[in-house]
Amino acid sequence: MTTAPPETSAPAWRLLLTYVRPHRTALFTGALLSLVTGGTGLLLPLVARELIDDLAHDRPITGALLAMSGLVVANTVLGALGSYVLRRTAESVVLGARRTLSSYLLRLRITAVDRTEPGDLMARITSDTTLLRQVTTDSLIGLGTGGLTLVATLVMMGVVDAVLLGVTLAVVVGAGTVLGLIVPRINRASRRAQDAVGVMGAALERTLGALRTVKASGAEPREERVLHRAAEDSWRQSVRAAKWSAAAGHTAGLAMQIAFLTVLAVGGARVATGAIDVGTLVAFLLFVFYLLSPIQQVVGAITQYQTGRAALGRIEDALRLPAEPPTRPVPLPSPGERPASVAFHDVRFRYSEDAPYIHHGVSFEVPPRGMTAFVGPSGAGKTTVFSLIERFYDPDSGEITLDGRSLGEWDLASLRAAIGYVEQDAPVLSGSLRDNLLLGNPEADGSSLAAVLKTTRLDGLVERLPNGLETLVGHRGTKLSGGERQRVAVARALLRRPRLLLLDEATSQLDAVNEAALRDTVTDVARTTTVLVVAHRLSTVTTADRIVVMDAGRVRAVGTHRELVTADPLYAELAATQFLTAGG
Ligand SMILES: Nc1ncnc2c1ncn2[C@@H]1O[C@H](COP(=O)(O)OP(=O)(O)OP(=O)(O)O)[C@@H](O)[C@H]1O
Ligand SMILES: [Mg+2]
């Protein structure tokens, strides 16, 4: 490239090149076409001089006219082709960035997701990547072809008349200095404008994601203000960037007019003194006229690059968020087919550096097969146990093992493939019922699907729905009842044929009949699978093989319902308040 980027932009520049590199052939083809287009344009003044010469000497002008027409047509055709190739390449660069970014974001560590706003990340994929389009065409190509055309035009001008070239250069350098002051402002304003778009994305996601809550709380006006403020902020900063871009563009335009007038004056004087002839002056003026386009291209390139740099910075920031370890070249072992055993050994864990510890040395052992229940007050760290088993987070100290091997030593994907996890809020994704059920195991066949629908008592629902399994469940499954959502989540986990089934409050919203049915299913599954359940309603876990009582990040006691009622005061109290002491 002809112009070295300023120091601070080097990383963004290099990052841009990594996106552009796969498309370099297309880019060079486009650039070459643009250059040739520029070249045909450059020849035009020379032919024009010929024409004037021919006229002056009463020679026929047919040849010159034909040459001019040919050049004009070639200019148009090649120009159109070149700009198509370039735009296509620019779209490919955007595609590449979107692919990279979406693949990366799907593999983010949950810790990173906890710290970011999904809406802002969404804006980075959709809005920021779009800005790369302009950077690729206007900026890279503009700088390349514009720069080369500029140099070529200047050389041609030098050939025609060195003095007039000096005059032109003086004007151009003056304009360049002014531009140097304007450009950093464009970058700052663009970055702020894009950040504001991110804020808007985050606010939108937050509001639309919980629109019922917002409406029920009558919070529309407040949410509206947040959205409007972000939109206005983006507007303000974009207008600021537009102002400086316009100033930059018009500085270039002004410079060219000054150059034109100065060349006319100085050139006129030189014609008068006989230093040059009229044809030379006309040719030079045409060159000055032709200078306008490459200069505007270069200025456009520089201003566009500032916007692109701001977007690249935001994309790069997202790509710096911690992601899950990629699959290693030497694959780690996968858990076997048997039901898994799980153990926590003195696990200490907190969600972030500046947060308090949630687990203060949690230890327990779960042998293969059977049902283990986790009970304890809200906030005791039960869900956290499951998050750690799924390796959404890693413990700060201590060890978690599956089949006696530390979690970190299993291949992450196959570790999760061994687990069926029903989260506490039983999330259902927008899409069809079938999509939701097969999310964890798209290969599940019809008969196992039918069997699971039966055990989770969803078969009745499917029959009732006009479109059956193809019924769309709405955003986050809003078209299903709470209990239906839970049963869909359980069915999804069962269809995975897990070796370890994690159920977090999976029956909390079920009616007595459905709960009893599901309890039977789980008891059945526990004969061949290791099942861990979290339950607030002790009635659902009294038959568990063992119960782990947790309180404030510690394991208080482990035992059966019968043992714990007498051995552990907290458990006895929980049981007493739920009228379970007599039973057992
Ligand atoms: N992603 C998170 N980031 C930071 N803190 C968290 C996060 N998730 C949970 N916590 C905190 O960790 C503590 C334990 O949470 P956890 O979800 O494990 O409790 P729980 O025993 O499942 O409670 P409940 O019975 O209410 O579901 C809580 O005090 C909570 O504030
Ligand atoms: Mg919980």
Image: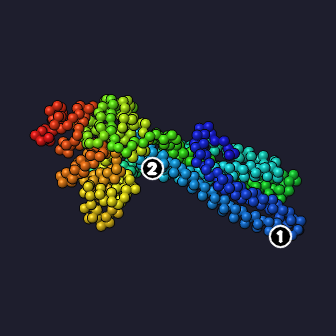
Give the Cα separation between the discs numbered 2 and 1: 61 Å
Say what amino acid the circle numbered 1 marks. Answer: Thr
| Pointer 1 residue Cβ closer than 8 Å to ligand 1 | no
* Mark closer to the chain start, 2 or 1: 1
Which is nearer the eye, 267 or 557?
557
Label 2, residues with CA under 10 Å away: few <14, some 14-19, many ≥20: some
Name the quarter where the C terminus is drawn: top left
Residue at position x 63%, y 56% in the image: 86
Residue 517 position, x and y percent, is 21, 53
Residue denoted by label 2? 122
Q: Is residue 2 left or right of residue 246?
A: right
Which is nearer the eye, 392 or 160?
392
Q: Secondary structure at mark 2?
A: helix
Q: Does the CB distance between marks 2 and 1 fall below 8 Å?
A: no
Residue denoted by label 1? 62
Residue at position x 84%, y 62% in the image: 50
575 over 462 or under it: above or below:
above
Q: Is residue 138 left or right of residue 340?
A: right
Q: Is residue 302 left or right of residue 203?
A: right
Q: Is residue 520 left or right of residue 221?
A: left
206 over 357 or under it: above or below:
below
Residue 84 visible, this angle: yes
